[in-house]
Amino acid sequence: MTGKVSRDEKRKLLEESRIMLLLGSTSVLFFVCVTPMVLLSILITPNLLMSFSFQVFRSVANSLEVTNYSISFYIYCLFSKEFRGTFLGLFSKTQAQRALLPPRMQQRDSTPQTVGGSTPLL
């Protein structure tokens, strides 16, 4: 073996590392942001509901849980070209129509089809 890596192998390795970063970062983010809510669910008692510090903890846990979902979206946009392309395609009429069509329909001509001379089917 010469030790040289082909262009395809480099691209595959780069794609695999991006996927690992995507999965690793979303997993760590999920664990960090959801753990306080799990603790909250385990520790809740009627006596704690009257405690101010418990209410602060509950508020922080709720905020972290919501933050997890919103930050995950940005992580996916950062690491995935396909996710970005699909998301941006939602704002372009032709791209959005293609994204919603099954793959076998995407190969066809984009001219509208008619049924028996009626209005075009989109």
Image (cartoon, rainbow, N blue to C red):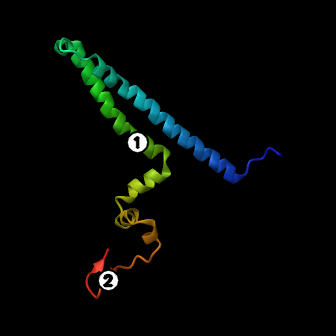
Q: Is residue 51 left or right of residue 66?
A: left
x then y, percent, for residue 61? 30, 24
x then y, percent, for residue 67? 33, 33
Residue in the image at 38% along x and 37% along y:
71
In the image, farthest residue toward the right: 1
- Which residue is label 2 attached to? 114
Residue in the image at 26% along x and 85% along y:
118
Q: Which mark is residue 113?
A: none
Which of the image's four quarters has the N terminus?
A: top right
Name the one closer to the observer, 41 or 94: 41
Single out the mark in the foreground, 2 or 1: 2
x then y, percent, for residue 74? 40, 42
Q: Is residue 45 left or right of residue 23?
A: left
Q: Describe the element under mark 1 as helix, strand or loop.
A: helix
Q: Is residue 101 above or below residue 41?
A: below
Q: Residue 72 lies in what quarter of the image?
A: top left
x then y, percent, for residue 36? 34, 22
The CA distance from mark 2 to mark 1 is 41 Å
Q: Is residue 109 above or below residue 10?
A: below
Which of the image's four quarters has the C terminus?
A: bottom left
Q: Amino acid at mark 1?
A: Tyr
In the image, farthest residue toward the left: 50
Residue in the image at 28% along x and 16% along y:
43
Q: Amino acid at mark 2?
A: Thr
Q: Is residue 15 left or right of residue 101?
A: right
- Crowding at dot 2, Cα within 10 Å, few <14 / some 14-19 / many 20+, comes out as few
Q: Which mark is residue 74?
A: 1
- Crowding at dot 1, Cα within 10 Å, few <14 / some 14-19 / many 20+, comes out as few
Residue in the image at 22% along x and 15% along y:
45
